[in-house]
Image (spheres, rainbow, N blue to C red):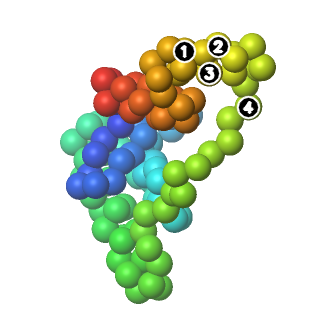
């Protein structure tokens, strides 16, 4: 995955901030916010570890689950034409539309 760093089971998205001439990391999929800054990759790793530790310690103190939970459901609005095409494609593979789309999304995520 491009522009990311992994810290144990936590993922951070990395971007460059030209206004301050530093890299910024922001942890995603959390029940709160945690970010960090550094001029280089080694510094980014060090600051990310510190930021994550502070965040996890705060969660533990306040009894908060650090990671967001997901229901496994989301709504998607697409054109009726695309909906029909996807339904037909799923039917040709003898699958429900939901299962077919889930398989497609899984392939995208795991083949990066």
Tag 3 and tag 1, C-beta contact below 8 Å = yes
* On screen, residue 4 above or below 65: above
Counting residues from the start of the chain, the first of labels 1 and 4 encountered is 4
For marks 4 and 2, give the one nearer the viewer.
2
Tag 3 and tag 2, C-beta contact below 8 Å = yes
Residue at (76% x, 20% y) in the render: 79
Q: Which residue is mark 4?
A: 77
| Neighbours of disc 4 within 10 Å: few (<14), some (14-19), many (20+) | few
Cα distance in 3D space between marks 3 and 2: 5 Å
Is residue 14 toward the left or the right of residue 6 in the image? right
Is residue 84 toward the left or the right of residue 88 in the image? right
Residue 3 visible, this angle: no
The tag on residue 85 is 2
The tag on residue 12 is none
Cα distance in 3D space between marks 4 and 2: 14 Å
* On screen, residue 27 above or below 95: below
Q: Which residue is mark 1?
A: 89
Tag 2 secondary structure: helix
Tag 1 secondary structure: helix
Q: Quadrant of residue 24?
A: top left
Residue at (36% x, 48% y) in the render: 11
């Amino acid at each position: 995955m491009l522009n990311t760093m992994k810290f144990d089971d936590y993922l951070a998205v990395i971007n460059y901030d030209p206004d301050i001439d530093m890299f910024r990391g922001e942890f995603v999929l959390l029940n709160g916010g945690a970010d960090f800054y550094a001029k280089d990759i080694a510094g980014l790793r060090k600051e990310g570890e510190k930021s994550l530790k502070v965040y996890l310690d705060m969660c533990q103190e306040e009894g908060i689950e650090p990671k967001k939970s997901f229901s496994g459901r989301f709504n998607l609005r697409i054109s009726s034409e695309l909906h029909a095409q996807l339904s037909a494609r799923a039917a040709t593979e003898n699958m429900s539309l939901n299962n077919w789309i889930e398989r497609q999304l899984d392939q995208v995520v795991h083949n990066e």
